Image (cartoon, helix red, strand yellow):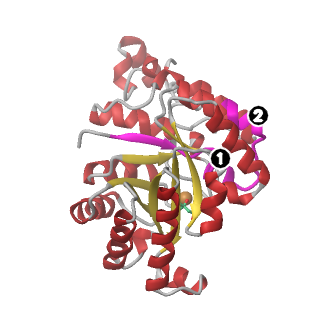
């Protein structure tokens, strides 16, 4: 467990938050801020969704940021083609792998593998890197997930995401899942943890322990339903609990405010790291002890995030 990359998906997963829609200018500004904080991978949108999303991804690619820019795509040639027009460095191709999802897509296990392979090959033929996502992979039949991922790897994918799409995992289960998949798959593994049971940050940390080399986050934890792993507490936890450096922690409060402003989703006062109360003390016993020595009631010094 030595590497950990953060992939920020505020502009893709985060924009799937009900009521949230960023303008193109806002997206470019958020992407620049993430890049400025040394976020290595930015998932900028799903171009097949609309002209606006596609234009935004194009604009962000054209910024030539240090971060690698990704576009999301279903395992369909038309989606991959839409992603290719945006000039991104990597396309993240996903397909549902549970029995229920395959049924709803009117696919069999075999036709889903074919769709995955064809779309991965199509992207690779156009010179872009590919991540393949086995959507809802933590609830699917493991042996099938390995089979479809192996096919995607043979077709040219070099990263595989095993998302906890409905947020039902525990840290122990995630750690075991990632060590199992890393023993079976010859690719870098991404974790994408939804927060339906409030486990997203703990599960993401456990994924790293199990062998994942990247974790998907959003600023302020935005995303479908209860969102996904929030970048701020996760990046700080990696540093404080595991000694792993990722993004520039001092930039987190300003990025959080920027995303609060453009998403219209308010930061809660008790939100870790960026909430108004995150480093405040109220009870007399606490206040007196903190005046004596701050570490009595602090998990880590607030100045590591510039507060
Ligand atoms: C979804 C897709 C996804 C994909 C994650 C990924 C998920 O919106 O259903 O590409 O790694 O949660 O499975 O966000
Ligand atoms: Cu998701």
**Measuring 47% from the left and 28% from the top, which residue is drawn there?**
38
Q: From the top left corner, tell me how far across and down residue 141 is, in percent.
A: 36, 79
Looking at this view, is 275 or 107 the one in front? 107
Asked if the residues shown at circle 2 and circle 1 are in contact, with their CB atoms under 8 angstroms apart, the answer is no
Looking at this view, is 293 or 240 the one in front? 240
Q: Against 198, is 42 above or below? A: above
Question: Quarter-wise, where is residue 245 in the image?
Answer: top left
Q: Against 165, is 15 above or below? A: above
Mark 1 CB lies closer than 8 A to ligand 1 = no
Q: From the top left corner, tell me how far across and down residue 224 is, in percent.
A: 62, 58
**Measuring 45% from the left and 71% from the top, which residue is drawn there?**
117
Give the residue at mark 1. 86
| Region rendered in magenta | 4-29
Q: From the top left corner, tell me how far across and down residue 208 is, in percent.
A: 31, 48
Q: Earlier in the sequence, mark 2 or mark 1?
A: 2
Residue 195: in sight, yes or no? no
Task: Give the class, few, some or many, for how many residues have Cα within 10 Å of label 1's Cα (few <14, many ≥20).
Answer: many
Query: Is 14 covered by the magenta stretch?
Result: yes
Looking at this view, is 152 or 105 the one in front? 152
Frontmost of labels 2 and 1 is 1
Q: Which mark is residue 25?
A: 2
Image quarter (top left, top right, bottom left or bottom right) of the N terminus: top left
Question: Quarter-wise, where is residue 35 in the image?
Answer: top right
Residues at marks 2 and 1, CA–CA distance in whole angstroms = 16 Å
Instruction: Using residue 232 as the reference point, say whether residue 73 is left or right of it.
Output: right
Dot 2 falls on a residue whose secondary structure is helix
Give the quadrant of ligand 2: bottom right
């Amino acid at each position: 467990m030595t590497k950990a990359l953060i992939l920020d998906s505020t502009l893709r997963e985060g924009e799937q938050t009900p009521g949230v829609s960023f303008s193109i200018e806002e997206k470019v500004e958020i992407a620049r801020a993430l890049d400025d904080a040394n976020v290595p991978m930015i998932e900028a949108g799903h171009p097949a969704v609309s002209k606006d999303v596609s234009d935004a991804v194009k604009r962000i690619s054209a910024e030539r940021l240090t971060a690698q820019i990704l576009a999301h795509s279903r395992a369909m040639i038309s989606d991959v083609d839409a992603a290719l027009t945006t000039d991104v460095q990597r396309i993240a191709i996903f397909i549902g792998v549970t029995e229920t999802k395959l049924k709803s897509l009117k696919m069999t296990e075999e036709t889903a593998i074919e769709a995955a392979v064809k779309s991965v090959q199509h992207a690779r033929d156009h010179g872009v890197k590919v991540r393949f996502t086995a959507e809802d992979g933590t609830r699917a039949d493991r042996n099938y997930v390995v089979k479809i991922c192996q096919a995607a790897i043979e077709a040219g994918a070099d990263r595989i995401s095993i998302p906890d799409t409905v947020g039902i995992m525990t840290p122990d289960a995630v750690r075991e899942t990632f060590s199992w998949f890393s023993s079976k798959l010859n690719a870098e593994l991404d974790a994408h943890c939804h927060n339906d049971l409030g486990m997203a940050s703990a599960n993401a940390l456990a994924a790293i322990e199990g062998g994942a080399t990247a974790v998907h986050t959003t600023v302020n934890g935005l995303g479908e339903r209860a969102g996904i792993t929030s970048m701020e507490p996760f990046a700080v936890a990696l540093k404080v609990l595991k000694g792993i450096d990722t993004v520039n922690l001092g930039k987190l409060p300003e990025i959080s405010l920027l995303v609060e402003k453009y998403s219209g989703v308010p930061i809660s006062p008790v939100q870790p790291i960026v909430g108004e109360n995150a480093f405040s003390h109220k009870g007399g016993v606490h206040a007196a002890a903190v005046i004596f020595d701050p570490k009595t009631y602090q998990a880590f010094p607030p100045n590591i995030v510039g507060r």
